[in-house]
Each structure stands twice: as structure tokens, then as C-alpha cells.
Image (tube, rainbow, N blue to C red):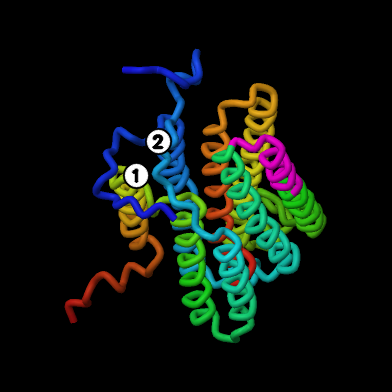
């Protein structure tokens, strides 16, 4: 394999040829402005008097904001499936943690129907 | 924009540094995600936690969120400059990111000072004396989550500084800007979830 034009030494091993930089570069300023708009909505939504509605709205917006950062700024959109699976595995682990600990947070009576 | 289809990219085409960083990020998501899960479950169980959350400084948290979102934009601009091998622009954007990290830490230090002054600490002896054991747990988790996140901010800023210095000195190793940048975005994503949970939901 020709090494013409490649840097030598350690960087030779880590060097990424331009054609292998498969990432796209979206309009970062546009993504940033959208993030700021969603951030402003989050702050105003917190003024709603009902804490449950506040939780649903702000947590949903947080998921959208995090997705925008991870897809566009971290370029996950362009990464191969193996990276997606790795992150999915992390989310599944968290779901198991949530489900495993959930019974500790509700009163025990809710799990048993009285025999009468 | 590069429109290469995902199906055409083989997993072994991922540069080593990028792959290693994604592995680290997946692990970090489990650590912070675990803390967030514990916070959510306890928040559901103990209504007293809502009262405690009202003692956090919403203005400081809001400014810090703006600062971190902006720093994420700066670091992705540094990555863009790194792709073009423009050392001066890489330095410019990374210095701005480090400035954001310092502002974030300064505001967090101010918040901690105020909260400790009010008697809210890792063990909160003043609350224990009043018999508010459950409320003490809130502050223990608050300091664990924000403190661990703060350490990641320090680590990310140091990584960015050393990578930038190395790039400026050698005019190579540009791919490391992207790897350090990925770490920085992760720090931002964690804060995106911590901010509403800690400051906005009472």
C-alpha cells in the first residue's frame, strides 16, 4: 500500500485520509440558534404552575436538544451502525436500572391486591 | 453536505480516536444516566425534594446552560477549522471554549458558596437537626451530580487546552480536536438534562 503523502511516526497510524472523513458538516450556526430557541422555551415552560406538566414539557425538550447536539455537533448522523448500537446498549442499561429501582419508590401496597 | 449513506460505511473505517471516544461516552452516559434515574425516582417518592429544589439559583443555572450551549457551538467550529487544518482558527475557537468553561466553573463556585452558606452541604447537619433526613439526601445527590459534572468540565477544558497546544506546536494531530470536542459535547448533553431536573422542576 502506498504511503505517499502520509505523515510518519505515530500519526501515520492514526491518520485519516480526506476521503475517509465521511462526516457531513451541517450549518452549525442554524443548529445553535435552534438550540437557543428550545432553551428559551424550556425556561418559560418552567413558569407553568403544574409541576407534572413542567416535567413533561422540559424533559421532552431536553431530549430534543440532546438529540440535536448528538446528531449534528457530534455527527452521529454520519456514524456507522456500531456507534448507534453502543449508545443503544447504554440506554437499555438505564431502562433496566429504572425498572429495577422503580418498585422501591412506590408504596408496597400497590403491588398486592388485598385478599379481602 | 456529505450525503454518504450509512450502509456504505464499514465499522472498521471509524478512526481509532473517534471510536475510543464514543466508547468512553457510552460509559459516561450510563454513569450520569444512573444518577439521573436515581434523582428522578427519589423526586417521585419524596415531595420534600421539590421544596429543596426551590433553594437552587435558577438565574445562575440558566446563565450556565447558555454558556455551555455556546461552548458546544465554539468547539464544533474548532473541529470545522481542524478539518481545514487552520491552526489559528482552531486556537481561536478552543480558547473561547476554555473561556466558557471558566465562566461555568466560576458561576458554579458562586452557587456552591451561597448554598453552603445556607447550610446545604453533602451531609447538611442543619437539616438533620430538624429531622429532615430525606431532604438531606437531595443535597447529597445534588452535590454528587453537579460536582461530578464540574470535574468533567475541568477535565474537558484541560484536554482541549493540551490538544490545542499540541496541534499548534506540531501543525498536525488535527483529529484530536474532534476527539476532545466529542468529549466536550458529552459534557454539554449531560448538563442539558441536569439543568431542568435540578433548577426548573419544583
Q: Are marks 1 and 2 in contact (CB under 8 Å)?
A: yes
Position in image of residue A113 (x %, y %): 21, 76
Quadrant of residue B168 in the image? top right
Q: Is residue B201 left or right of residue B107?
A: left
Position in image of residue A2 (x %, y %): 35, 17
- Judged from the image, the secondary structure of the residue bearing numbered disc 2 is helix
**Region of the chain picked out in magenta, as a range:** B85-99
**In the image, are marks 1 and 2 on the same chain?**
no
- Residue B202 appears anywhere in the view: no
Q: Is residue B157 left or right of residue B180?
A: right
| Mark 2 lies on residue | B19
Q: Is residue B25 above or below residue A14?
A: below
Position in image of residue B202 (x %, y %): 60, 74
**Chain under label 1?**
A
- Residue A51 appears anywhere in the view: yes
Position in image of residue B121 (x %, y %): 71, 51
Amino acid at each position: 500500500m502506498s504511503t505517499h503523502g502520509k505523515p510518519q511516526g505515530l500519526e501515520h497510524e492514526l491518520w485519516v485520509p480526506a476521503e475517509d472523513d465521511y462526516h457531513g458538516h451541517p450549518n452549525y450556526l442554524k443548529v445553535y440558534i435552534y438550540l437557543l430557541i428550545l432553551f428559551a422555551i424550556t425556561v418559560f415552560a418552567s413558569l407553568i404552575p403544574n409541576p407534572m406538566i413542567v416535567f413533561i414539557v422540559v424533559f421532552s425538550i431536553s431530549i430534543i436538544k440532546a438529540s440535536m447536539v448528538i446528531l449534528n455537533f457530534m455527527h452521529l448522523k454520519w456514524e456507522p451502525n456500531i456507534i448507534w448500537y453502543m449508545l443503544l446498549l447504554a440506554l437499555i442499561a438505564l431502562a433496566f436500572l429504572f425498572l429495577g429501582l422503580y418498585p422501591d419508590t412506590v408504596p408496597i401496597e400497590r403491588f398486592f391486591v388485598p385478599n379481602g | 453536505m456529505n450525503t454518504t449513506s450509512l450502509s456504505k460505511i464499514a465499522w472498521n473505517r471509524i478512526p481509532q480516536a473517534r471510536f475510543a471516544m464514543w466508547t468512553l461516552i457510552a460509559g459516561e452516559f450510563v454513569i450520569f444516566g444512573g444518577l439521573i434515574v436515581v434523582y428522578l425516582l427519589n423526586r417521585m417518592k419524596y415531595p420534600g425534594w421539590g421544596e429543596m429544589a426551590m433553594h437552587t439559583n435558577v438565574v445562575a443555572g440558566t446563565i450556565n446552560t447558555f454558556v455551555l450551549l455556546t461552548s458546544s457551538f465554539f468547539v464544533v467550529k474548532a473541529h470545522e477549522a481542524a478539518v481545514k487544518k487552520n491552526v489559528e482558527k482552531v486556537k481561536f475557537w478552543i480558547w473561547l471554549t476554555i473561556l466558557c468553561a471558566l465562566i461555568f466553573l466560576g458561576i458554579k463556585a458562586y452557587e456552591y458558596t451561597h448554598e453552603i452558606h445556607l447550610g446545604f452541604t453533602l451531609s447538611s447537619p442543619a437539616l438533620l437537626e430538624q429531622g429532615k433526613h430525606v431532604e438531606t439526601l437531595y443535597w447529597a445527590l445534588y452535590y454528587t451530580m453537579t460536582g461530578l459534572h464540574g470535574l468533567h468540565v475541568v477535565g474537558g477544558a484541560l484536554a482541549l487546552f493540551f490538544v490545542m497546544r499540541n496541534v499548534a506546536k506540531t501543525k498536525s494531530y488535527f483529529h484530536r480536536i474532534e476527539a476532545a470536542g466529542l468529549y466536550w459535547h458529552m459534557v454539554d448533553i449531560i448538563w442539558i438534562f441536569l439543568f431542568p431536573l435540578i433548577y426548573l422542576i419544583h
